[in-house]
Amino acid sequence: MAKINDILEEIKALTVVEVSDLVKLLEEEFGVSAAAPVAVAAAPAAAGAAAPAAAAAEEKSTYTVMLKGVAEGASKVGVIKAVKEITGLGLTEAKELVEAAPKAVKENANPDEAKEIEKKLKEAGADVELK
């Protein structure tokens, strides 16, 4: 179990792009797909949509900040710099993330952090969505 915990700690230290690459490599190596668990996770969310209006009015506890692209007329360089600052990625990785939009910039962000990231990205000229 200690070995598994060590691996988990290593994964926690990875960037979003690195985790994505790791998942792809694991899928290829073992001939599996991470798509099935995602579909299963979506089912409870659909059930939650049928909840009473009071529950729907509650604020979410975590958000995923999605970069949808660079706003028309905006500088892609500014968006890349903002993504680099927010994620801690290198310049090349930040550029790849921006060019691969729509893409998650930050997952499981608390509401305040998500709104701050959204603000920084919009100021840089990005189209952003909170999920």
Image (cartoon, rainbow, N blue to C red):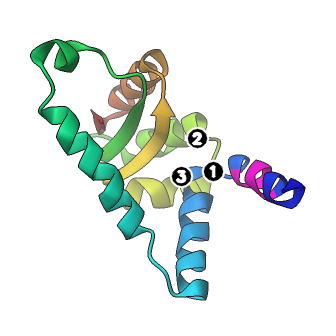
- Rendering coords of residue 66 (x, y %): 35, 42
Give left or right: position of 31 versus 10: left
**Quarter of the view holding residue 116:** top left
- Position of the C terminus, as image quadrant, is top left
The residue most toward the right is 2
Q: CA distance from mark 3 to mark 2?
A: 8 Å
- Whether residue 56 is in magenta: the answer is no
Q: Tag 1: residue type?
A: Thr
Assess disc 3: are there few (<14), some (14-19) or many (≥20) residues with their C-alpha within 10 Å of its C-alpha.
Answer: many
CB atoms of marks 1 and 2 within 8 Å? yes
Mark closer to the chain start, 3 or 2: 2
Looking at the rendered structure, the kind of residue marked 3 is: Ala
Q: Which residue is mark 2?
A: 87
Q: Give 21 or 61, whichever is nearer the viewer.
A: 61
Q: CA distance from mark 3 to mark 1?
A: 11 Å
Q: Which residue is mark 1?
A: 15
Residue 73 lies in quadrant: top left
Mark 3 and mark 2 in contact? Answer it, CB < 8 Å.
yes
